[in-house]
Amino acid sequence: MDRLQSLRVFVAVAEAESFAAGARAVGLSAPSATRGVSALEAALGARLFTRTTRRVRLTDVGRAYLQDVREILANLQAAGEAATGAAQTPVGQLRITCPQEFGRIYVSPILTEFLDRHPGVSADVLMIDRVVNIVEEGFDIAVRIGPQPSSGLAAIRVGQVRRVVCGAPGYFAGRGCPQDPAELASHRVVSVAPLNTGRQWRFGPGGERMVRVDPRLSVSSVAAAIEIARRGWGICQALSYQIGPDLEAGTLRTMLEDWEPEPLPIHLVHIEGRRAAPKVRAFIDFAAERLRQTDGLNWKS
């Protein structure tokens, strides 16, 4: 097995955390994959994996090496595409990560339309409510909601959303509607783990007003909290796009609008330069246009 193939095998095994699964991903047998990685470790003079009977895990050296190898393979792919003229044609697998509800509501329909337009592209989408390191975890694009820290990544703003407090009209009819954040203490609150890691909610333009809440119920799913509020049991925090249909239908209403924090920006984040392959550039352009035209995301140039 040549060195380049050994590098591809190493990446596949690292991502699958399994020699058998990694071997299948590159069309090899498990023994061949094992020999390739062992040869690579021998050439480097370092162990890349710790092996158990159930799975394999990267060592510290292996984790650092994985990031470098991914960059090498991506640059080789970009060079090959440029040499063959494929640099203008979106092809290959596109790996995207985004928040769960945003992915369900917005990314899914945009992505399926994009795939219909580009038959040479396939996609793998991880919808998860945590910040994914797209370099270390091998993603092409991430949808991020919130301020972006300084990094070597390109970030294209495509919209913004509000953080709101909402409940059902029937709930407010029975318990009244709070006019000041301090009044939340007398209301039945549903806390959502991705939004509320503690027991304090932020209010005011800069989020400077901190109000302690005492949730009667805490859940890890935004959709579940919204459904509970929709049924009139209590009130919850959500992002404005998550309850757009409910606001239009009148099944939910917002409160404390004058106390809302500044809107949260939405960005499409990706690795720029030669690593921005045609499939990435094409999807970024396509998705940015669609999202900026979407009602409820309040995009401003």
Image (spheres, rainbow, N blue to C red):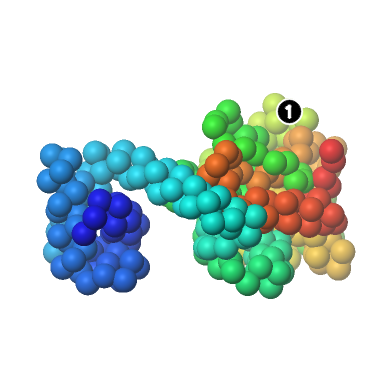
State the image coordinates of residue 9 (x, y, percent, origin top left): 28, 58
Of residue 264 and residue 141, the one placed in the foreground of this image is 141
Q: Is residue 295 left or right of residue 41?
A: right
Residue 152 appears anywhere in the view: yes
The image quadrant of residue 136 is: top left
Q: Residue at x 63, y 72 (%)?
A: 119
**Which of the image's four quarters has the N terminus?**
bottom left
User: In the figure, is residue 280 to the left or right of 22?
Assistant: right
Residue underneath mark 1: 206
Q: State whether residue 229 appears in this view.
A: no
Front-lying residue, 241 or 68 = 68
Residue type beneath disc 1: Gly
Residue 202 placement (x, y as % from top left): 67, 35
Secondary structure category for the residue under label 1: loop
In-front residue for pair 170/153: 153
Residue 89 in the image: state x and y as whole percent: 63, 59
Please say if 145 is above or below 219: above
